[in-house]
Image: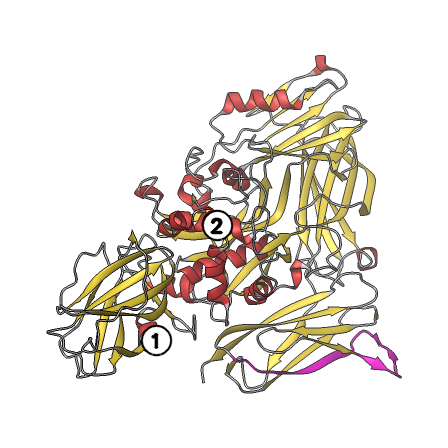
Amino acid sequence: MERVQRTTHTSGGINGPCQLKFVNFQADENHISHETQGLSKKQLVVRRGKPFKLTLIFDSEWDPQAESLVLQVCLGSMSETFRVQHSDEWSSPHSWSAKIHPGNLHRQSVTVHICSPVSSPVSLYELLLHIQTRQNAWSCRAGTFVLLCNPWLKGDPVYMPLEDQRQEYVKSDYGLVFMGTSLNVIKRPWSFGQYEPGVLEACLKLLHVSPQHLRDKGKDYLRRADPIYLSRVVCAMVNSNDDLGVLEGKWHGSYTDGVNPTEWSGTADIFHQWVSSNFKPVQYGQCWVFASVLCTVMRVLGIPSRVVTVFNAAHDTDATLKVEEYYSSTGEKLSKTKDSVWNFHVWVECWMRRPDLGDRFDGWQVVDPTPQEKSAGTYCCGPCPVTAIRQQLLSVLYDTPFLYASVDADVVRLIVRDRDIVGMKVDAESVGQLICTKRLNSDEAEDVTQAYKKVYEPKIRRSYAITVGKELNPEAEIRRFQEVYEPKIHRSYAITVGHSAAEGRMFQGENPPALEVSLTIHGVPSVGEDICMSVTVRNRSSSARVLMEHVNAQMKEYNRDPRACFWKSHKEVHIQPREVLTLRHTIFTSEHEPFLAGDDIVNLAVVIKDTQTEERVLAAQEFNVSSPQITIEIEGGDTIPMNKEHTAHVSFTNKLTKTLNGAVLSVNGSALLQGKLQARRVLRNTLAHLKPGEKIEKRVSIKATSPGTKLLMATLSHSNSPRCFAKNFHKVSVKAA
């Protein structure tokens, strides 16, 4: 495109050419042809590299022999001008072109087919029409249209070859976010909302208020042709840390001045609030909210995208490929490091070619909008090829070392007493234990762990123990063993402490540690039920031992260290030579009900100590507690037509053994009902006590004004718990009338 000074009207006199009366953008037909149905009711939305058509209607008969049609597409201060040809052939695919097919020419109208280059920037374009004769010319503004990436076109860098994938990763407005822990995966629906009014416009506005655009509009427009560039701009704009971004993150404390991240169920509400507040960041988001909003924008722009969850995701702050965790000698997890392992972390994969890296890095790219670390001075992350993470190519752009650590760092668990290290275990298996996304055409999870890690190939495991004195330097020991056994091949080792450094000895290969311990959670723990577990201790030595067993349970947030313990057990255990001993424990409902609500996460750890040698071994496990069930049913089924009222039945039955005081059932669905509805069970004109076996229910009238997938969300709270006690989502498919 060349820069021009735009004029809107020139006249050639009384005998000037015919003038344009009306432009029919053939929106319905073009939207079907370009797979953009529903994205906008106001704008023509088309995909680059594919012809679209419009009909020009004149105020008098147009003479194609004497009057030439010239089109001009404008983007900011740049434009490109091209003559409408009478031909069945297209000119160069690298420039704009237009033609009239035989049979599309009538006395006062003509249908023009326009094709953009496949390398065109994504944006809102202005279209001008010039009618020229030998003597004079007339110009007018024909209208505007939106141009998007084209994953249906082989030449586009976001081309995706399979139709079912394009339908899922571009056109679907419904997704699932997987949360909880790998032991009990929770499915949470999300409405991407790209067909909701105003969402397309908000996505374009996001590009328009980015620092890149505000700094240099022309350069930004040109670079928008590149999905790599687009993904980095959008990634940074989803969070508000550096710019006029959409979401402000918050991970602890009160959310009363905004919205608790757990209450969001779709992108449209977030965008509407952001735009209506003149780009003030929406409060608040966490990883799954950031990722889901990013996925919405990328799908709107035409870049295939999906939300991915990494269970046990490491946040390696010091780029050492290891994360330290500290435990007391009685099994309580301590807060002593900036490194952390999140029970789950959610990011986005975007599909694109990588000409900057070579074709072996084409395909899925990780883009993570959660503001954790800066990339080139900005809070964005990616796009990083999933292939580079799997092959441990840490020099590949962008942010590969950070993302590799997220899925494959070592966890170094240190046992401390009186500020001394008294035991250490390195776990090379738990980080990135499960990585999953929504399966094609299904509400089940697809395990994509193998795309990130060579988990199913034969592994060489190193297992050894060291008995040392109190002057142990764990950093030096870890470095020494990493040097010995690099490249890293899933190391697993433990260090325990004896009475003096002189007693130190190494057990390797056929000489394993004398004591081994493992921890197992039985079943899926649920609110209102006992939590059962077992500790297995193996004595590999030829002598009997007297042990102390310390088991500790702490409640925690998915991305933070645990709070104080709410349950513990200590007892002496005798174990015979070569014996394998199973110790069973139960946390009774009455012991955890005052602390745990639905979806809460528990850190459980056991430390076994040999009372004679002071050898200590540790095992830890984290699990989430399933919430009670809220029932949501739609009269007539889950598929409803637009603009017609339907009734939803929402109910909760108390299956616990205790009474829930002040039970409140709330229903929310921004695209189905206005505001938030609450049902309070009232008995004898006082706030109710929902007794065991009793039900609270609500009839809700719903109506959708736009097609697509909508979500109803129901929550239950009661005065005994400061947090939401139970939550459920229900998918409603709305069909166009």
Image height of 542 relative to 201, above or below: above
Query: Can you tell which quarter of the image residue 61 is in?
Result: bottom left
Would residue 691 appear left or right of 289 to someone viewing this image? right
Three-letter amino acid code at the position of disc 1: Ala
In the image, 234 versus 620, the foreground residue is 234
In the image, 717 versus 152, the foreground residue is 152
Name the spot of residue 314 as percent of width and height, x first.
59, 41
Name the spot of residue 272 as percent of width and height, x first.
57, 66
Whether pointer 1 and pointer 2 mark residues with C-beta atoms closer than 8 Å, the reply is no
Name the spot of residue 31 as percent of width and height, x first.
34, 72
Residue occupying the point 13% across, 70% down: 86
Q: Spatial distance from mark 1 to mark 2, Cα to Cα? A: 31 Å
**Numbered disc total:** 2
Three-letter amino acid code at the position of disc 2: Leu
Query: Can you tell which quarter of the image residue 75 is in?
Result: bottom left
Query: Can you tell which quarter of the image residue 605 is in?
Result: top right
Would residue 289 appear left or right of 126 to someone viewing this image? right
- Residue 27's label in the rendered image is 1
Q: Helix or strand or loop: what does disc 1 sit on?
A: helix
Is 704 contained in the magenta span? yes
Q: What's drawn in magenta, residue-wise? A: 681-705
Residue 192 in sight here: yes
- The residue that mark 2 highlights is 214
Residue 150 in sight here: no
Would residue 623 appear left or right of 462 to someone viewing this image? right
